[in-house]
């Protein structure tokens, strides 16, 4: 359809409004169709667009009210009431912090809205209506037919009270917050459908989170942190770290860069689609497609970042700059983690680095699209990683689970945190002191889930270095449990077998 542009004088506003409404694809539809000039129905009288009609030089600071302790401290409550009253009387607006809504829920709400608007128009259209008696109303400009000029926005609203709608009355894209409870619920379904998934019921266990603040500056703190890292590596094989030194903006941009890559046109991605493991950039779906018993509901891209860091133009354009920056940061963090892990084994801090645990770094980007039948498949089959350690960045959707005390435990998405896990090769060289633990990712009706897993190991590269249980920690009571191997031999065995739910370590057991 053709819309009148701003410079066209005579036009039939009513029929244009109607034509726009009939597309049911909103302002987003116009942008998707590539408009470069806005249709006339969106042009407002200049006087209503003045940026600051009574411009004054006064610096205004917008009120921010801290609700901390409002329920527990009567003195604080009185102060807060005063601030709320003042702001309400003067500006009529204020921000609140410490309001009790967890940050991950707010972020996921924003993501859910994005998912709703960015789904295919055909899927959104079912909600497009001007019938305001409906529980969910999606349209562009609720007042399109009556206002003098349209607004550059699309909306949907859902009436959530007094009658709370059932989840299936709400758009799938943002119906659930993927809280631990939702995932447990989903696990219950998996359990009912297939015993292969082996879920044993919900657990009260909380996933370890370690604050790295002070590692470099405070020796007492460092000792405490080493203890925590050792305990978590011995019992869970997994932990999250915060205050790890990588700025939030870098983490967020890495997730966005991953999304940009996977959401690019097929022709662009296709150029990188390969099963040739000697390449530095490998994009495909299911690295083990030909060897595993069932495929996973995910696509991945691998970039080998060390040794021999690629030049930026060897990397996909959608995420090249952020990947260079992110992998440098991850390498620094990895060096710190290997120090802490060395100390946890009673070894010199540089021990694991000196035997080249930080020589190789492969970054794997995972994209788990929404799945129409998540009860029949899985995002990533249960497996343990075939490296020394993995540093995992996950978005806010959730779905990663770790096997702990015979139960699947959710790894809660924590804004700003990174998930660290011990890989098979570190279990092998630590002679089973540190555990490489099984984990998996559930498929989900909501998507995409995005994760970036950085593997410390040299993968298929023939380095010739031999790894066996570290001699310095062996004793008569702690004899070697594994034969020596190379990273390449281990990697080839792992990939040859594919993700089939069994461990590769047993193959190397003495
Ligand atoms: O996507 C995730 O959270 C985990 C992926 C994973 O386990 C892996 O790539 O080895
Ligand atoms: Fe993994």
Image (spheres, rainbow, N blue to C red):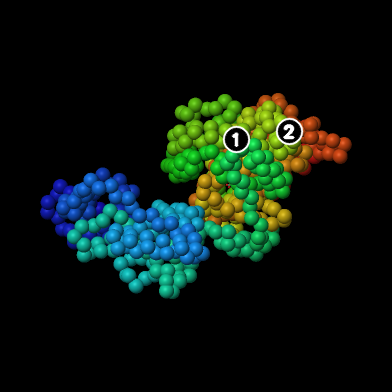
Residue at image mark 2: 347
Tell which of 158 and 236 is nearer to you.
Answer: 236
Left or right? Give the position of 475 relative to 434. right
Left or right? Give the position of 157 relative to 351. left
- The crowding category of the residue bearing disc 2, from other C-alpha atoms within 10 Å (few below 14, some 14 to 19, many at least 20), is some
**In the rendered view, would you say 107 is above or below 328?**
below
The reply to whether residue 217 is in sight is yes
Residue at image mark 1: 216
**Tag shown at residue 101:** none
Q: CA distance from mark 2 to mark 1?
A: 18 Å
Q: Quadrant of ligand 1?
A: top right
Give the total of numbered labels: 2
Badge 1 element: loop
Mark 2 or mark 1: which comes first in sequence?
1
Residue drawn at x 18%, y 54% is 48
Q: Position of residue 306 (x, y in %)?
A: 58, 29
Left or right? Give the position of 52 relative to 401. left
Badge 2 element: loop
| Residue 229 in which image quadrant | top right
């Amino acid at each position: 359809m053709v819309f009148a542009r701003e410079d066209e004088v005579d036009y039939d506003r009513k029929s244009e409004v109607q034509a726009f409404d009939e597309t049911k694809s909103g302002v987003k539809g116009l942008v998707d169709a590539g408009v470069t000039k806005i249709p006339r129905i969106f042009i407002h009288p200049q006087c209503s667009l003045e940026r600051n009609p009574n411009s004054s030089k006064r610096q205004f600071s917008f009120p921010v009210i801290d609700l901390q302790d409002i329920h527990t401290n009567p003195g604080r409550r009185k102060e807060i009431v005063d601030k709320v009253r003042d702001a309400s009387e003067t500006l009529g607006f204020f921000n609140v912090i410490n309001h009790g809504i967890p940050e991950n829920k707010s972020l996921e709400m924003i993501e859910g809205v994005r998912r709703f608007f960015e789904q295919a128009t055909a899927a959104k259209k079912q909600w497009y209506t001007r019938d305001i008696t409906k529980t969910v109303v999606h349209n562009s400009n609720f007042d399109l037919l009556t206002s003098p000029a349209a607004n550059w926005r699309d909306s949907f609203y859902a009436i959530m009270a007094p009658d709370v709608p059932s989840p299936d009355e709400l758009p799938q894209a943002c119906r659930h917050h993927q809280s631990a409870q939702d995932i447990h619920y989903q696990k219950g379904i998996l359990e009912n459908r297939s015993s292969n998934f082996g879920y044993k019921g919900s657990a009260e266990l909380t996933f370890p989170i370690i604050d790295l603040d002070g590692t470099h500056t405070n020796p007492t703190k460092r000792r405490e942190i080493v203890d925590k890292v050792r305990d978590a590596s011995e019992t869970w094989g997994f932990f999250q770290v915060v205050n790890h030194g990588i700025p939030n903006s870098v983490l967020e941009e890495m997730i966005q860069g991953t999304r940009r890559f996977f959401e690019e046109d097929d022709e662009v991605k296709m150029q990188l689609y390969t099963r040739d493991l000697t390449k530095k950039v490998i994009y495909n779906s299911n690295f083990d497609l030909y060897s595993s018993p069932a495929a996973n509901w995910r696509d991945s891209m691998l970039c080998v970042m060390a040794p021999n860091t690629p030049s930026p133009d060897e990397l996909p354009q959608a995420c090249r700059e952020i990947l260079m920056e992110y992998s440098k940061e991850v390498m620094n963090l990895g060096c710190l983690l290997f120090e802490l892990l060395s100390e946890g084994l009673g070894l010199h801090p540089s021990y694991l680095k000196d035997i080249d645990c930080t020589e190789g770094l492969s970054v794997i980007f995972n994209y788990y699209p929404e799945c129409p039948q998540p009860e029949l498949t899985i995002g990533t089959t249960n497996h343990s990683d075939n490296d020394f350690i993995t540093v995992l960045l996950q978005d806010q959707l959730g779905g990663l689970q770790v096997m702990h005390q015979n139960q699947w435990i959710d790894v809660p998405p924590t804004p700003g945190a990174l998930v660290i896990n011990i890989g098979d090769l570190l279990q092998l060289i630590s002679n089973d002191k540190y555990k490489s633990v099984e984990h998996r990712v559930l498929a989900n009706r909501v998507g995409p889930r995005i994760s970036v897993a950085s593997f410390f190991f040299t993968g298929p590269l023939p380095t010739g270095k031999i790894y066996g249980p570290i001699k310095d920690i062996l004793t008569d009571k702690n004899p070697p449990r594994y034969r020596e191997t190379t990273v390449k031999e281990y990697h080839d065995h792992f990939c040859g077998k594919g993700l089939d739910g069994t461990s590769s370590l047993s193959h190397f057991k003495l």
